Amino acid sequence: MNLANYKATLSFGNGAPNIEMPVYHGTIGPDVIDIRKLYGQSGMFTYDPGFLSTAACESAITYIDGDKGELLYRGYPIEQLATDCNFMETCYLLLNGNLPNATEKHEFSHLVTQHTMVNEQMHFFLRGFRRDAHPMAVMTGLVGALSAFYHDSTDINNPEHRAISAIRLIAKMPTLVAMAYKYSIGQPHLYPRNDLSYAGNFLRMMFGNPCEDYVVNPVLERALDRIFILHADHEQNASTSTVRLCGSSGTNPFAAIAAGVACLWGPAHGGANEACLNMLGQLQAAGGLAKVGEFMEQVKDKNSGVKLMGFGHRVYKNYDPRAKLMQETCNEVLSELGLENDPLFKLAKAVEKIALEDDYFVQRKLYPNVDFYSGIVQRAIGVPVNMFTGIFALARTVGWIAQLNEMIADPEYKIGRPRQLFTGAVRRDVPPIAKR
């Protein structure tokens, strides 16, 4: 962060003296006005619901240019990472700032692989949940409980503790997600296999069984690996901000990540691809392809209450760069599994075609986003809709950890304490009960 060659001057209409505030600029992106001394000098706060115009931290991890449709991890375009790297390389990059060389890649992957098992007592903890519980409810509990099983790495201010908890979380999340899934369908959990890749191991734990060997399909393996890469981090979104805010209190890394999992569960955030598939399912039940045109017309009508899920993005004002990559993967997976003519997938293609060609959607830049395609891919692979957000949490864990570590290492970080515009009752006295 560098001081820009100018300052911002705030003037008041009530005659109060002007206030000059420093302006900083990063390597790319908008300049920021430093308002930290505003309250001390003026007695006033800023008002910014949703923090849409507020930079709450300094970060060097992920950069998004919503107007250009650009996403960079440590400066590398997401298109190159998703094409030329695997998820383990991406994890190393987010955690360490640079891509690994061959030796570093091997050592990092080996280290993660050695920590994929979870404490056996976790199985007893899991059995306390109802089998029909939503997987994200289970995941929130399991991740939070890790601090009870691995309490030798819970000091967030200890760099060694943060390093080992990072590896443990990245390594164990696939195991926990697969455990939650197997538990929900009454099947035995499979222990991880150290001779498989990160994505391949997860596929086996999800869909294998003890009765026979599971052969990993390389197309599905690469598709899942790409999903992990595309969801690994996304700047200061709601769940990442939650992890930072939670971690700012000094709580342990497992608790901070569990808070991120809980935030991600929301349908406006990590639940978007689940909502998208549910939308397609409802459309199919209402008549399928014959009703697509009518449905899209209802979407255009603001009074209909019908929403188009999986299209447009709060940050990307242009095309979501992850969507094109996921679209390629989507077509590869459907072709590999012979599902091009599956009714639900044909329905999705029909919705996509209208959205890409109809002036109403094109002018508003309501392009398909990554959630639209990733949901289709996951359903094709065999992942049930209610597990989508759990896989999102698995992928985003490394981003949360990188952001948390960056915050702790920042000498300027403080415990989060947003202010408010109070509109409640002014001071008043409590009347006797007979006069209330």
Image: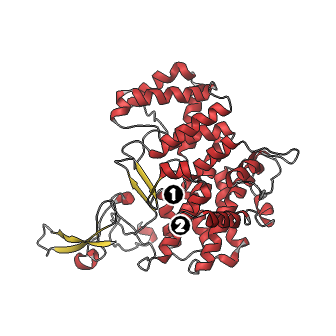
Q: Which mark is residue 250?
A: none
Disc 1 secondary structure class:
loop
Distance between the alpha carbons at the discs numbered 2 and 1: 9 Å
For residue 49, side relative to residue 176 (left or right): left
Decide: few, some or many residues near mark 2? Use Cα within 10 Å; few <14, some 14-19, many ≥20.
many
Residue type beneath disc 2: Ala
**Quadrant showing the N terminus:** bottom left
Residue lying at 87% horizontally and 44% vertically, measured from the top left: 212
**Quadrant showing the C terminus:** bottom left
Q: Is residue 144 visible?
A: no
Percent x, y for residue 27? 34, 65
Disc 2 secondary structure class:
helix
Residue lying at 34% horizontally and 28% vertically, measured from the top left: 359
Give the camera-side residue of 294 and 313: 313
User: Do labels 2 and 1 touch, CB within 8 Å?
Assistant: yes
For residue 202, side relative to residue 360 (left or right): right
Residue lying at 49% horizontally and 38% vertically, measured from the top left: 309
Residue 412 vertical position relative to residue 336 in the rendered view, above or below? below
Give the camera-side residue of 285 and 409: 409
Q: Which residue in the rendered view is the most extreme toward the top?
A: 290
Residue with the mark numbered 1: 233
Give the camera-side residue of 420 and 370: 370
Query: Which of the 4 image quadrants contains residue 330?
Result: top right
Badge 2 or badge 1: first in the primary sequence: 1
Residue lying at 34% horizontally and 36% vertically, measured from the top left: 364
Residue with the mark numbered 2: 402
